């Protein structure tokens, strides 16, 4: 199956493990992701707090580029997915905003009709379009004995969730059940990682992160799986600072869901980006899955 | 208290909030149920929860609202939005309040506007976000001492090849800039 693909800025360097692993997993599943030409940053939440129309127009440039030859556009980052889906919906439902955004796009000889491209998140594509049977067929190394905490965060499931619940999403839970893992049912799986808050208020940000890490520990998880570069960065890179602030001793590996899908498909850990996380994941994985070699 | 026709009644401040928020007219249907504040991960840190804030907006308390920390506590998690029984786009209203507070120079005691401006400055210039530039420029200009605590994490990221030293520039950055310029023009007119 072929899709247009919007990587987003984080995938290039900071979330390289996500990028590498999603490409490897796509190969196994015969998914073809054609990166849209010359895409720009989606603006995350930062344009929206300054200028609504500019925020929408920056996102819409990507929609217009994708719309020239694709009917489905896949994003792997939750914030990118959220912005693309939100602006697409706004343009199809709000004629006045649609007109203004198109006036701005016209300055770059572009145009976009709301609703003409279906915006997807990578997780939904893997779970809904590939499905249980084909995914189970590809398993070479079942994740038996590994307790994983699927972490959905916010913007992939809210405000616009394609095919999953905004309160209690299940797609990643199902996926890892198919792969043989023990999926941890913990109450904060769709709570917030803090987003850009570590830069603004460490007290607020680290408290949100502490709640997530503590819950995963309370429910005896071996690792947390992410579907968003911002979530992974916040929980992984700031974990030692969280420990410093609260006197905790978290050593919770935070990896991208595609990395562990890759392991279940029998791919080498290095090929799917293990080693790029700050809180090492391989020792835990090795301990739990005897077959995995470092 | 209850405003039935958003286009005719309600405070001037309420009208301004509605005018800048797509779908913002739903605010007049607020039941004061408090689902928003109860759902908010940062609700406990807010001077006013969204429910209280909406009552203040209705009462034309412009300065109290725009000087408050409420919208700056918002992390755009959208829990309030999806839980609101009246379909009020609460997160989008928080964005509008951020915009109004910045425009009216009432955003105090928060580095959020500076972070937003630094972030979008790089996107305006290159078409892509630039994490190292954002982090160093934002911290140097706004909180140099906090930068010291960021050091070990930055090195860890760098050592694992997760930090680019130079920004990536898109090919048609002039096209993006023309779109942004036009959008800002239209925004100013309306």
Image (spheres, rainbow, N blue to C red):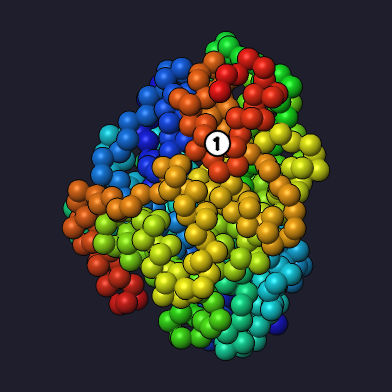
**Along the viewing direction, whichever of A71 and A287 lies nearer the viewer:** A287
Q: Is residue B144 above or below residue B106?
A: above
Q: Position of residue A90 (x, y in %)?
A: 44, 55
Q: Is residue B78 above or below residue A186?
A: below
Give the residue at mark 1: A256
Q: Is residue A78 left or right of residue A173?
A: left
| Residue drawn 61% across the image and 77% down it | B69
| Residue drawn 40% across the image and 56% down it | B131
**Chain letter belonging to callout 1:** A
| Residue drawn 50% across the image and 20% down it | A268
Q: Is residue B147 above or below residue A33?
A: below
Q: Residues within 10 Å of mark 1 (few under 14, many from 20)?
A: many
For the C terminus of chain A, the image quarter is: top right
Say whether residue A161 is visible: no
For the N terminus of chain A, the image quarter is: top left
Say whether residue A7 is visible: yes
Q: Is residue A191 left or right of residue A228?
A: right
């Amino acid at each position: 199956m072929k899709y247009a693909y919007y990587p987003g800025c984080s995938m290039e360097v900071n979330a390289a493990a996500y990028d590498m692993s999603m490409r490897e997993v796509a190969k196994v599943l015969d998914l073809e992701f054609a990166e849209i030409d010359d895409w720009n940053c989606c603006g995350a939440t930062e344009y929206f707090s300054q200028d609504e129309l500019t925020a929408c127009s920056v996102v819409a440039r990507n929609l217009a580029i994708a719309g020239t030859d694709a009917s489905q556009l896949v994003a792997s980052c939750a914030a990118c997915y959220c912005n693309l889906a939100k602006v697409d919906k706004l343009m199809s439902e709000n004629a006045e905003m649609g007109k203004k955004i198109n006036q701005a796009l016209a300055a770059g000889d572009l145009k976009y009709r709301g609703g003409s491209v279906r915006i997807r998140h990578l997780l939904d594509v893997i779970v809904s379009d590939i499905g249980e049977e084909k995914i189970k067929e590809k398993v070479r190394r079942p994740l038996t004995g590994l307790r994983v905490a699927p972490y959905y965060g916010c913007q992939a499931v809210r405000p616009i969730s394609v095919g999953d619940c905004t309160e209690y999403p299940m797609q990643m839970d199902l996926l890892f059940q198919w792969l043989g893992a023990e999926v941890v049912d913990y109450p904060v799986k769709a709570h917030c990682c803090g987003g850009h808050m570590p830069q603004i208020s460490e007290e607020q940000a680290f408290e949100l992160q502490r709640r997530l890490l503590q819950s995963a520990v309370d429910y005896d998880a071996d690792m947390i799986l992410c579907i968003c570069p911002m979530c992974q960065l916040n929980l992984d890179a700031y974990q030692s600072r969280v420990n410093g602030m609260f006197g905790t001793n978290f050593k919770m590996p935070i990896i991208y869901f595609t990395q562990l899908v890759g392991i279940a498909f029998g791919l080498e850990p290095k090929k799917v980006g293990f080693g790029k996380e700050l809180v090492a994941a391989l020792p835990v994985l090795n301990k739990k899955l005897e077959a995995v070699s470092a | 208290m209850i405003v039935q026709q958003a286009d005719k009644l309600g405070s001037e401040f309420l009208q301004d909030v509605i005018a800048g928020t797509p779908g913002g007219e739903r605010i007049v249907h607020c039941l004061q149920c408090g689902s928003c504040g109860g759902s908010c991960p940062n609700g406990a840190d807010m001077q006013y929860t969204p429910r209280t804030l909406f009552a203040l907006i209705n009462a034309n308390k412009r300065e109290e609202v725009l000087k408050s920390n409420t919208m700056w506590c918002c992390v755009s998690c959208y829990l309030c939005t999806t839980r609101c029984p009246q379909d009020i786009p609460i997160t989008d209203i928080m964005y509008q309040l951020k915009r109004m507070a910045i425009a009216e120079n009432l955003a105090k005691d928060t580095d959020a506007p500076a972070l937003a401006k630094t972030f979008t400055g790089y996107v305006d210039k290159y078409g892509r976000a630039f994490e190292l530039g954002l982090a160093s420029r934002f911290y140097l200009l706004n909180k140099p001492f906090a930068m010291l605590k960021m050091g070990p994490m930055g090195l860890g990221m760098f050592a694992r090849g997760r930090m680019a030293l130079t920004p990536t520039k898109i090919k048609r950055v002039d096209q993006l800039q023309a779109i942004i310029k036009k959008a800002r023009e239209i925004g100013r007119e309306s």
